[in-house]
Amino acid sequence: MIPPEILTYCITHSTAPSDLVKELGEYTVKHVSGSNMLIGEMEAAVLGFLIKLGGVKRVLELGTFTGYSALAMAEQLPPEGSITTVDINPHTTKIAREFWDRSPHGKKITQVLKPGADALGELTGPFDLIFIDADKNGYPLYLEWALANLSARGLIVTDNTLWSGKILTPGGDKQTDSIIAHNTRARTLDGYTKVLLPVRDGMYLITKS
């Protein structure tokens, strides 16, 4: 969305994740297909800032991939904080656990290896931060569940809500239309304050007014 040199400037002027998180990102780029799914340092910095600002203690993440975002968030949580992260891929989540086990913050992370809809049926809120970054066709369902399971001062953050600009042309494919449906639902919510940020591929922030 912005020139690479400006992005680099922003990253170098923001709180960076640990060297272990960076190592995990580099490993993912080199060895894992679909490494573009990593949130990257800029988005990690935004999530970390929100965790500190909101006094977040309990996080739910939908979409683990190789565990980069979960570890970056865990580093910003207080000692009693916790993250439950949901994914269906045993290979990438195994990589995640190997890196989490090397961090003193890894003990804050609980992995649920199930489809999102199945996992949500077994989870109990409220959560202070719900980070939606899983299968895009599930976005409308995940948003509804998040709205019903958010703490009083909690925050929903949904990733990829600009979808490389494809949200401007509905009807192209199911994933795009699902993200558009999520965005439309968020925009029309009563009693909530929302902002869609052009950070990375779009971060939609939603909180109760």
Image: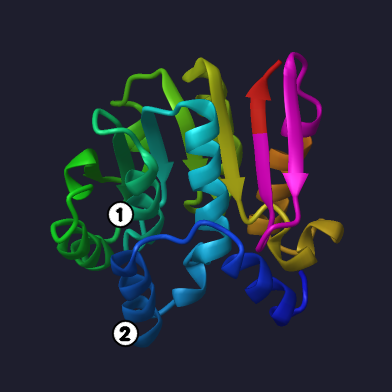
Which residue is label 2 attached to? Answer: 31
Q: Amino acid at mark 2?
A: His
According to the image, what is the colour scheme of the structure? rainbow
Residue 88 numbered mark, or none? 1
User: Where residue 125 sits in the image (x, y, percent)?
Assistant: 38, 19
- Where residue 96 sits in the image (x, y, percent)? 25, 61
Q: 76 and 43: which one is in front?
A: 76
Number of disc labels: 2
Q: In the displayed orientation, state which residue is furthest to the right.
A: 168
Quarter of the image containing the C terminus? Answer: top right
Find out whether residue 193 is within the magenta segment.
yes
Q: Contact (CB < 8 A) between labels 1 and 2?
A: no
Relative to 193, say whether 29 is above or below: below
Residue 84 located left or right of residue 156: left
* Residue 141 visible, this angle: no
* Residue at x-position 33% and y-position 20%: 124
Residue under the image location 15 percent in, 61 percent down = 102
Q: Quadrant of residue 194?
A: top right
Q: Which residues are magenta?
A: 186-205
Q: Residue at x 48, y 36 (%)?
A: 51
Q: Label 2 neighbourhood size at 10 Å, few (<14), some (14-19), many (20+)?
A: few
Identify the amino acid type marked 1. Ile
Q: Secondary structure at mark 2?
A: helix
